[in-house]
């Protein structure tokens, strides 16, 4: 198993953001976390990334083995793409930062934009820089929080093909969140549905469709919304 979390609970004051959440993701697997606003998706990824402490629960991997691509990345608009990557490579203390940066530029297709100021890039290219930062230390597990939310359909397709390649070829375990449930159905091997801080479903997209008992056959998004409604969310 590439990484595992067991019994994760997190409170913010009186509010319980996560209640007894467990998950696992295998090498080369794509796991989508879907659920309504405020369900706890970002909180869960932040805990898996090791940047937020849970109140209870256990994680199988230390922070340094996890790549983290937050929704609001910490990159610098006034630095070039290469300078940003070098900065983060040094912060992460990777061996031979310059070589790692050149490899990441090539891998993410950013070599020809390496000297451009980050702030001048399109959303799609900026998102590739964010992912490159998450991959600098060559982590076995990559976490992506709503990676496609600001991308147009073509850039979205490109992003998912890249992430899919990471999982299939590099055997990276990938956990991502999205509000685009069609995207989860298309790209994820398994989905985990979070609602009000609790796991209400884990399984394949096909199993989620059949977990929802109506005769009526609509799209995956319709099935997902009905699934939540039937369970009182
Ligand atoms: N730092 C914080 N302090 C207090 N409450 C917080 C904090 N971070 C998150 N919460 C609360 O925890 C709950 C879960 O938030 P979280 O951001 O994890 O949800 P989410 O599923 O990522 O939502 P969205 O789909 O809108 O991104 C929410 O009720 C949120 O208000
Ligand atoms: Mg979120």
Image: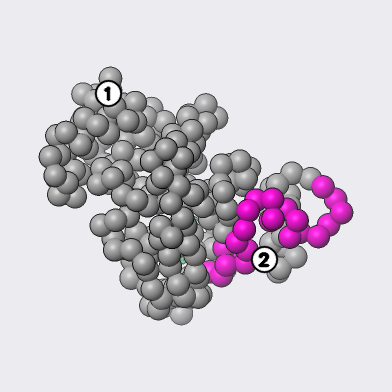
Q: Residue 226: x percent and y percent?
A: 74, 57
Q: Residue 21: x percent and y percent?
A: 50, 70
Q: Quadrant of the N terminus?
A: bottom left
Q: Look at the image and say whether residue 8 sits in the magenta stretch.
A: no
Q: Which residue is mark 1?
A: 111
Classify mark 1: helix, strand or loop: helix
Classify mark 2: helix, strand or loop: loop
Which residue is situated farthest in the top direction here? 112
Q: Which residues are magenta?
A: 194-217
On screen, residue 174 above or below 229: above
What residue do we see at 79% from left, 45% from top?
A: 218
Q: Which residue is mark 2?
A: 233
**In this rendering, would 140 be left or right of 210?**
left
In this rendered view, identify the residue nearer to me: 29 or 126: 29
What residue do we see at 32% from left, 35% from top?
A: 129
Asked which quadrant contains residue 77, the reply is top left
In this rendered view, identify the residue nearer to me: 180 or 22: 22
């Amino acid at each position: 198993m590439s990484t595992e979390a067991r019994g994760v609970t997190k409170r913010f004051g009186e509010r319980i953001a996560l209640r007894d959440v467990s998950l696992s993701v295998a090498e080369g697997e794509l796991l989508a976390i879907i659920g309504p606003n405020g369900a706890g998706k970002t909180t869960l990824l932040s805990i898996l990334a090791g940047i937020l402490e849970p109140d209870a629960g256990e994680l199988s991997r230390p922070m340094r083995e996890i790549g983290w691509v937050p929704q609001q990345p910490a990159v610098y608009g006034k630095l070039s793409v290469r300078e940003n990557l070098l900065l983060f490579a040094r912060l992460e203390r990777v061996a031979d930062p310059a070589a790692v940066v050149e490899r990441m530029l090539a891998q993410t297709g950013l070599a020809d934009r390496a000297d451009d100021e980050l702030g001048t890039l399109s959303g799609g290219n900026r998102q590739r820089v964010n992912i490159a930062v998450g991959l600098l230390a060559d982590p076995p597990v990559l976490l992506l929080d709503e990676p496609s939310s600001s991308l147009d359909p073509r850039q979205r397709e490109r992003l998912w093909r890249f992430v899919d390649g990471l999982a299939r070829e590099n055997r990276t375990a990938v956990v991502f969140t999205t509000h685009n449930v069609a995207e989860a159905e298309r790209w994820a091997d398994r989905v985990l549905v979070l609602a009000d801080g609790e796991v209400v479903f884990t399984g394949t997209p096909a199993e989620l469709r059949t977990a929802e008992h109506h005769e009526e056959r609509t799209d995956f998004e319709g099935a997902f919304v009905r699934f939540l409604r039937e369970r009182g969310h």
